[in-house]
Structure formats: C-alpha cells, structure tokens
Amino acid sequence: MRRNTFGLLAILLPTIAAATLPSRRDATGKLMVSLPPGVYMMGDNAGPEEDERPAHQVTLTRGFWLDQYEVTRGDFASCVEAGVCFYPRRERQKSLGPLGPTQEDNWGMKYCNQEMPLGPSDHPLTCINYDEARAYCEDWRGGRLPTEAEWEWAARGGLEKKRFPWGGEPPTRARALFGQFDGTKPVGSYAPNGYGLFDMAGNVWEWTSDFYDGALYHKGPQVDPIGPCPSSQPKCPGYFHRTMRGGSWITGSLGMRVTYRNHHKHWNRFSVVGLRCAADLSEVTKAD
C-alpha cells in the first residue's frame, strides 16, 4: 500500500513544538519562521459565513517562510528611509487633528500610523493598501505575500479541527486584541500559536495574495491553491477584491476564527489593515 506522506505529516504536525521550527532573519533583519508542507481541512462547515464552506482538504506541497510578527510601522519606516517604499501622498495631506475614540472615527487618521512621527515603531503598520503591501514584501523584503491557503495553514499552528490559533477555547481579551476601539497594540503582546507565530488573530487584518472568490471552496483546486487567478496578474476577470485574514482590534469575536475571510479592493486602505510577508524557502538566505 502506498503511504500517504502528506496525510501522515498532517497527523504528526501537532506534536511539532514551535521551538523546533527553524527561524531566520531576512536581509532586512525581519524574523521569519520556516513552516512545513502538509495537508489540512481548510474552511468551516459550521461557520456563519457561506464563503467558508465547504470545508475541504488542501495540500501544500512546499514549505515556506512567514514573518513571525506582523510588519510594524518601524519596519515600513526603514523601507521608506531606503527610498524603496513611499508614504501615500493623500495621507500626508490629511489633517492631523485629534479624533475621538468612536467606531466612526476609527477609520480616520488617528489610527493610521504609516507616516512618521505617528504611531510607535513596534505597533503593526496600518492603512497600507494591497499594492503597497505587495511592493513592500517583494521589492524591499525579496519575498511575497502569503496565499490564503498558506495563511490559514500557518494560523492553525499545527492544530487539527480547531477554530482559533490557540485551540478550541473561545476568544478572550487575554488571547487576542479584538472588539475594542482604542487601536493597535505592540506586535507580540499575546502568546504565539503552535508554530511560534504572533497575532494570527486580532490586532490588524493581513493582506494575502489571492483574488477573492466567495464561491472558491466549491470549485477551487485543492493542491497549492492560489485563488481564481495567479496573484501576479494585476487583473482577474470578474474578480475585483483581494483577500484579507486574521481579524483586527475592532473586529468581533467571530473574526478571530482561522477560517474567517475578508476582502477589499486593492487600492483601499483602512486603519485596521496591515500585513505580514512570506517567502519561498530558497529566497531567504541571511541567517539569524
């Protein structure tokens, strides 16, 4: 009988401690974790959102690097100082007057921290759109954004059939930053998941490379899925949004689930949206 290597790997993964996963710093000094290939059930048949169904088996045939922490304002500032990244002009022209801590004001400049001197350097970068996020990961970091399937695999941290990065227990303010109106917290403020990744739920939404298709799980490929079109295509006929994952500081508890999907047009920027970068294993060569 042929051995199902990926199936066996999926069974063994919960026993892999985070400390055993290799980690390295890329050329910019950002710490990344090496995640293994494997098989898992993507989506949630019992979830409240139709675009999470049906749960289906996904195989990732290649391992990849993923940032241990969300990209911070300080990380992005270094890219700007090097002349590779740029602060958006329209953000510079906005008033810097104080805004009240209400839900309506949360989409305003108070919580957008791209621009120096706004925002402490250890908070996750906010108000970055998809195009800027992709350029940061590719042009500055020499990597890429993770696919949606890679992101969910990473968020699960080796756990099988669990709804949250930490397991099956419901979200609490001790486990993740969500459901409040005071903005972000420094990256790594909460315990990591089983792969040693921080803030896979809450703090800020994270862009992925995939075009968003709400019906993709009913028809999409199950081996190394990349969405309805390759991410390298600037346009995908019939699809106009890119997918985001992870929930944010203002999202309700349902958004903390590893299967929850969100999406926006590539030019949109919000004070609840940031990123983390991925890379193929061969693309990160500088050791920690």
Image: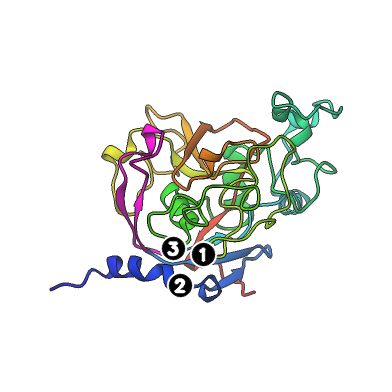
Name the residue: 53% across, 73% down. 22
Q: Are marks 1 and 3 in contact (CB under 8 Å)?
A: yes
- Distance from disc 2 to disc 3, alpha carbons, whole Å, reads 8 Å
Residue bearing the label numbered 1: 194
Say the numbered circle drawn on residue 16.
2
| 234 w.r.t. 103: above or below | below
Dot 2 amino acid type: Ile
Which part of the image, by quadrant, shows the N terminus? bottom left
Vertical order, 35 against 221 (above or below): below
Mark 2: which secondary structure?
loop
**Amino acid type at mark 1:** Gly
Which is more toward the observer, 139 or 281? 281
Compute the Cα span from label 1 to label 3. 6 Å
| Residue at the (62%, 60%) spot, across then down | 191
> Magenta residues?
38-63
- Please report contact status of discs 1 and 2: CB closer than 8 Å, yes or no: yes
- Whether tag 2 and tag 3 are in contact, CB under 8 A, the answer is yes
| Quarter of the rendering occupied by the C terminus | bottom right
Q: CA distance from mark 1 to mark 2?
A: 8 Å
Q: Is residue 185 left or right of residue 64?
A: right
In the image, residue 221 sits, relative to residue 30, either above or below, namely above
Q: Which residue is mark 3?
A: 158
Q: Earlier in the sequence, mark 1 or mark 2?
A: 2
159 inside magenta stretch: no
Horizontal arrangement in the rendering, residue 244 relative to residue 104 (left or right): left
Residue 5 image point, x, y percent: 27, 70
Residue type at mark 3 is Gly
Structural crowding at the residue carrying mark 3, measured as other residues with C-alpha within 10 Å and reported as few (<14), some (14–19) or many (≥20): many
